Amino acid sequence: MWNEFNIKTFPAETIVYRDGIYQEKISTLPELKNINKKYDLPVHIIYIGKITGENTLNINLNQSNQPVFLSVNIKNNFPAFFNIFIKNAGKNSNILGHILLQNSSDLVVKITAEHSAPNTGILLQTKIIGEKNSFSKISGTAIIDKNCENTKSDIRFAGHALDKSAKIRFTPKQRILSVPEFADHSAYIFHPNKEQENYLQSAGLSSADLKDVLIESFIKDFNLF
């Protein structure tokens, strides 16, 4: 399954969801509503598969000095809404997330990242691949509450439209009530130019191979925080 969804594994306590359903047999932790305990290993939350309709993922970190990783790799062939709410109240704890979305229909994703303690980090990179005639709307809201100094907030968006009919819309927001160490937003649209395509085709790639190579390079180009 890890190879199927291109999820990198490492020593960690895991909470795994597939098609929106918690997978007890391949998880080492129960489906936690709140992370209140210190674990010797990082906590890795994995959300993979296909979604449709309304879907929600809540991550509430209340433990100090606890690293948490989030890996999302989902596809939708029917209209879907995905709400991701992340709250970090664990001093000196960081949440690092890589979110990959592959949309063939209408997809709305709402990401809320709230810092409610000082010295907390929430660093997220979200990528969307839009298929022909698809519509993708991705919003990300970073909230830094009062008395939450020295926080690290970074919400990044990247989009790759596979056809001119694919529409991608990013909406970044910030509500900052304390002085952070940094609070960043960024977004870009990936689109190869004609010279790059000609170079790859001159190396012997067919049009189908070229599309696959460009998608693979876009997916694997996750920047490390």
Image (tube, helix red, strand yellow):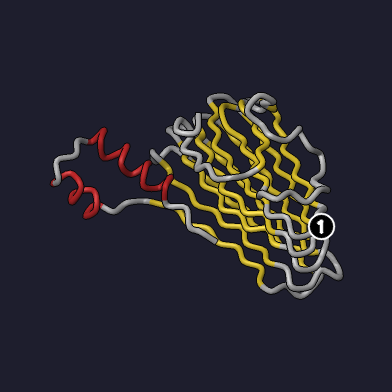
> Which type of secondary structure does the marked residue at label 1 adopt?
loop
Tell me if 50 is positioned left or right of 166 in this view. Answer: right
Tell me, yes or no, if residue 149 can be seen here.
yes
Residue at the farthest front position? 40
Tell me if 206 is positioned left or right of 48 in this view. Answer: left
Image quadrant for the C terminus? bottom right
Above/below status of 38 relative to 49: below
Residue at the farthest right position? 147
The amino acid on which the numbered mark 1 sits, given as a three-letter code, is: Ala
Name the residue at 26% across, 33% down.
Answer: 208
Name the residue at 50% across, 28% down.
Answer: 1
Which is nearer the eye, 90 or 191? 90
Above/below status of 174 relative to 82: below
In the figure, residue 161 lies in which quadrant?
A: top left
In the figure, residue 219 lies in which quadrant?
A: top left
Name the residue at 68% across, 66% down.
Answer: 152
Q: Residue 110, percent across and down?
A: 68, 44
| Residue bearing the label numbered 1 | 89
Above/below status of 105 relative to 156: above
Q: Residue 198, percent across and down?
A: 18, 49
Tell me if 11 is positioned left or right of 204 in this view. Answer: right
Tell me, yes or no, if residue 21 can be seen here.
no
Q: Residue 221, percent across and down?
A: 42, 52
Q: Number of marks in the image?
A: 1
Which is nearer the eye, 225 or 112? 225
Q: Residue 4, percent across and down?
A: 46, 30
Name the residue at 68% across, 54% down.
Answer: 67
Q: How many residues crowd around disc 1 within 10 Å: few (fewer than 14), some, or many (20 or more)?
A: many
